[in-house]
Each structure stands twice: as C-alpha cells, then as structure tokens.
Image (tube, coloured by chain):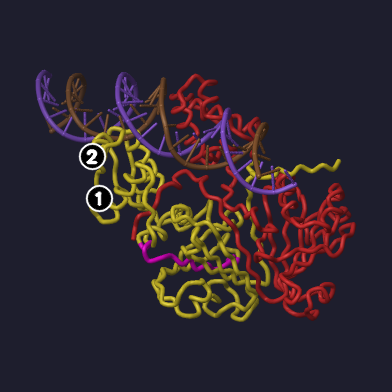
Chain colours: A yellow, B red, C purple, D brown
Amino acid sequence: MAVSSPRTRYQALAESLLEDIRRGRLPVGARVPGELELAGRFGVSRHTVREALRRLESLGLIGRRPGRGTLVLNGRPQASYVQAVTQPEDLLQYPTGSRLRVRETAELTAGRVLARRLGCRAGERWLRLGCLRDFADDQPPVCWTDLYLRPTHRDVVPAIGCRPGLVHELIEARHALRTERVEVDVRAGQLPATYCEALQAEAGSPSMNVVRRYLDAAGSLIFASHSEHPGDRFTYSLTLERGWQSGSGLVWSGK
Amino acid sequence: MAVSSPRTRYQALAESLLEDIRRGRLPVGARVPGELELAGRFGVSRHTVREALRRLESLGLIGRRPGRGTLVLNGRPQASYVQAVTQPEDLLQYPTGSRLRVRETAELTAGRVLARRLGCRAGERWLRLGCLRDFADDQPPVCWTDLYLRPTHRDVVPAIGCRPGLVHELIEARHALRTERVEVDVRAGQLPATYCEALQAEAGSPSMNVVRRYLDAAGSLIFASHSEHPGDRFTYSLTLERGWQSGSGLVWSGK
DNA sequence: TAGTTGAGATTGTCCGGACAATTAACCAGG
DNA sequence: CCTGGTTAATTGTCCGGACAATCTCAACTA
C-alpha cells in the first residue's frame, strides 16, 4: 500500500507514534512520553504535539488524563463485548437502528471469481469480514455483507468484533486511506446457498447483489464489500451537502 | 434537563452556538460566523474559538472546510457523498460520453401507481421528461429515464430539448432547490412494453428499475426520476468529497 | 463569451508563553 | 499504620501572533 509522506509536523509525529504502537515499542498500557518531552525530542512546540495526540486519541489509539499522562490503548479500551453498531454504520446509510454484526473473519486469496467481482487481480490477499445486518431479533435480517480489507489492516480486525464503533473506525480508515471514488455494481440474481441460513431465506430465491469498490484518487482499489439483499429490490439513500456549491450558481429565473 | 454552568470559555461559546442550533437560529445548512468574528464577538482568542468549534465538530453538529467556512450539520450524517458535478451528466454517473436526449414531454396528474412509485400524493401535477440515454447511434441505448419536475419549473422545459448540458443544469437546479437527501429504490423486474421500442429490447426481458426521489431538509419531495435499465444489472459510481471529518488528516503509515 | 487572474475571506498549521487543574509520590506528624 | 500536606510532573485552558492553503467572487483579458 502506498504511503504518502506526511505534510505537516503533527502528522509526522503522529505517524511516528503510530509506528511505535504498531511495532510494539509502545505496547498497550504503556505510557507515552509527556508532551514537553515529545516537543523537545521532535523539535516542535507543545501545541503541535497536542495536535498529534488529539488525532491519535480520536482514533482510539491513546487515552489522556490530566495529571496522569498519556496511555496507549490501541483500539481496545473497553472490555465489554458489544457487537452492535448504532450510528454511522456504513458508507451507504441503512435505516437507523440497524446493526452490523461480525459473524466470520477469514483471510483468503482472491480467485478468478472474486477478483472479477472486486475488480482486483487474482492472487491478491484479503481479509474478509462476514457481517449480518439486522434490525431486531424478531425481524428477518436486512442483508449479509462481506467486507474485504487489505491484510495490512489486520490490526484493525481484532478490534472489530469486540467494540462498538466498528464501522466508524472503518470509515476513519477509509478517509485516512484516501478513498475518493466508490463504484457500485447492482445485480439481480438468486441467493447463493452460502447465505441462506443467516438470511433465513431459501437458496435460489431472488436476491439483490451489491458490490462496492472503494478507490483512491489513482484508481487503485482500497477495499471492497459484497452484500446480498434478499428479495428483488432494495433501497438506499444518500445525503448531500448544501450551500457549498462552486461554479455557475444557476438561479431559477422562473416565477 | 439540568444545565451545568460552563466552567471554561470555550464551553460557554460552544453552548451558545449549540443553543443557536437547537433553537433554529442556526438551521442546518447555515453558515456559522467566521472564527475571527466569533473571537471578537465573545472577547476570546481565535484559539479558544477553534477549541469550541472542534468540540461541536466532533459531535457532528458542524463541519468545517478551509477557505469556505463552517457549516451547521446538526447531527445529519456528514455528507460523505457528493455526486460528481464536474463532467457527469446525471446524479448517477453514466459512462463518459453518453448522451441524454429528451424524446417526450408531458404534463400529467399522478395516479395511484405513480404516486406510490414516487412517494407523493395521488393527484399531484408533474412535468414528465422522457429521455433516452445512449452512447452512439450504432450502440443500443443505455436506459430510458423519466424525469419528473414540478409544474412550477415549466419554464425550464423548453430549454431542455435544444441544448447540451441539460442534466448539468438540472443538477444545479437540484442544488438551488435545496435537495438534501436522495432516496434510491432499485428493483429487478421486466421491461414494460412502453419502453421496448426506444430501448430496442423485447417486452418482458430483464430490466433494472431505478427510482430516485430528491428530498429537501423537511423530507418533501422536490423532483424524481424513473429509469429502466435493460439487463439484470447496472453500475454507477459516486465521488466522495473528503475533508469534513476531524481527524481525517492522519495518514496511515502501516505497510 | 469563455477563460484567467487577483484580492479578500476563511480555516489550517505552527510558534512562544503563561497559568490552572489534576494526579502520584514523597514526607512528616499523629 | 494512617493521615494530611507538600511537591513535582502532567495535561487542560487561554492568550498573542504569523504564515500557509484553500475557496469565493469580481474584474480583467483574449
């Protein structure tokens, strides 16, 4: 995966600390050096150090306490085992209240079929997270979604099953990874036998097959997902920004 | 609800802005005064203003962009999806080079079927623009699209058939009309006889039926479209606008 | 008419400094 | 042993300032 060089000082510092956490030089529970010490060591102001720590904190990598210092958390602060995800769940918004539950995790090599589906080369390695999305226990599931992540993000995977904010983190990662374009294939077909049990539907019944590919500015595939929606239709919605259009600013002249 | 008195200046400022948002003095989509103006108005430094805005941003209440300013979001999902408005012709991006040609125009009253499809009340009046999208004369058309506009926009209709950039203008119009949300229904079905000739396909052959509803902040229907894509699949792509999330500047350095 | 340029506005990135609030560790006294 | 106070370390809260990057809009030019 291409690594873009940091453009700002706090980014450089954040990446340095991130590297220390990834490599184990700063294990979970360890103390991060104080702000003044980091400032001195990196030759930046304390303000810049705090900006870097703020970013890491927002990603759940560290925690800070006045008087105590900064602690490495690396994404797993809570011991609670909650798989439910409430708020922003996926790039395509699903009805409020639906939950995305991780059922399976696996590492695999893309064969010809998967490579064609995802638009990648055969032989590439992927992490697959098999997730079931549903509203409530007494309602049939909405869909099955396989998320395909790069093996380089394996460190994210263990945190996924055991804390809320799962997909939120994926979204953060997506942003960090510079997704710029999403391609979506929609296909009507029949439900593969693989998903029958989880979706409480018969094999061969109608199903909508949705494949999403997340690309960066260069057109490279970052990650992907494959969903099976039982039935012969599905609905999604997009939210737009308002009031920030550049360009002609065409105004309706009718009355 | 008990309101604890703010202890810090940025809290006071954040609560003041929060109150404005809650009371509707700063509605969704409105611009928040600039940092310098807020600093002057509240008698604090710009640094303090930024801390307050940072908190509000992390709560999803506002969004900020360099050069543009600060926008009230108020919990609305951070508009991740802005469909490309540069070269694309429609909200759903079609392959470059495809053309949308108006074939029919009509004014009609929504019956029960159409009302159900568009999500409006039966009896509403609409302008329907029947358009054919295609690449070239020697290739089969991509799809048929019926655009449904309000009769108040009748003055636009005559201009549509006689100049390129049609749908681009519609997009501008959509923004001007304050579309905030797009609902998309995708359904697999069979091609209605109505579209057979134009699409050079047999009635009853597989077709993807896509209905899009453009809603404003209040959830009212602004305009709609209905497309028939021959075949059992279709593809579209979205372009992602980045930079609203706080913390998005961090670059993952793992490899 | 269409494209370019430039001024102005706005947020982002940095620096330096100061004091407050919180915590942990140490120490003296009961 | 326990209690309380002191002290040092650490993060939180603010100020002032400077420049960079980005975007809008109007004016200009071909």
Position of the N terminus of chain B by quadrant: top right
Q: What label does residue A41 carry, if any?
A: 2
Residue shown at the point (85%, 61%) measured from the top left:
B112
In the image, residue A121 above or below residue A242: below
Position of the C terminus of chain B by quadrant: bottom left
Tell me which amino acid carries mark 1.
Leu
Tell me which amino acid carries mark 2.
Arg
Which element type, helix, strand or loop, lies under badge 1?
loop
Residue, disc 1: A26
Q: Horizontal and vertical percent for residue B187?
A: 70, 69
Q: How many marks?
A: 2
Q: Is residue B88 visible?
A: yes
Which element type, helix, strand or loop, lies under badge 2?
helix
Location of residue A133 (image quadrant)? bottom right
Tell me how far mark 1 sits from mark 2, CA to CA.
16 Å
In the image, residue A189 above or below residue D8: below
The magenta segment is A140-154
Q: Horizontal and vertical percent for residue B100?
A: 76, 63
Residue shown at the point (39%, 54%) measured from the top left:
A4
Q: Horizontal and vertical percent for residue B190?
A: 76, 76
In the image, residue D28 above or below residue A71: above
Residue shown at the point (44%, 24%) measured from the top left:
B7
Q: Horizontal and vertical percent for residue B35?
A: 52, 29
Compared across the picture, whether A65 is left or right of A161 comes to left
Compared across the picture, whether D25 is left or right of B156 comes to left
Q: Is residue B18 visible?
A: no
Compared across the picture, whether A101 is left or right of B19 comes to left
- Between discs 1 and 2, the one toward the N terminus: 1
Q: What label does residue B212 carry, if any?
A: none
Residue A145 within the segment the image draws in magenta:
yes
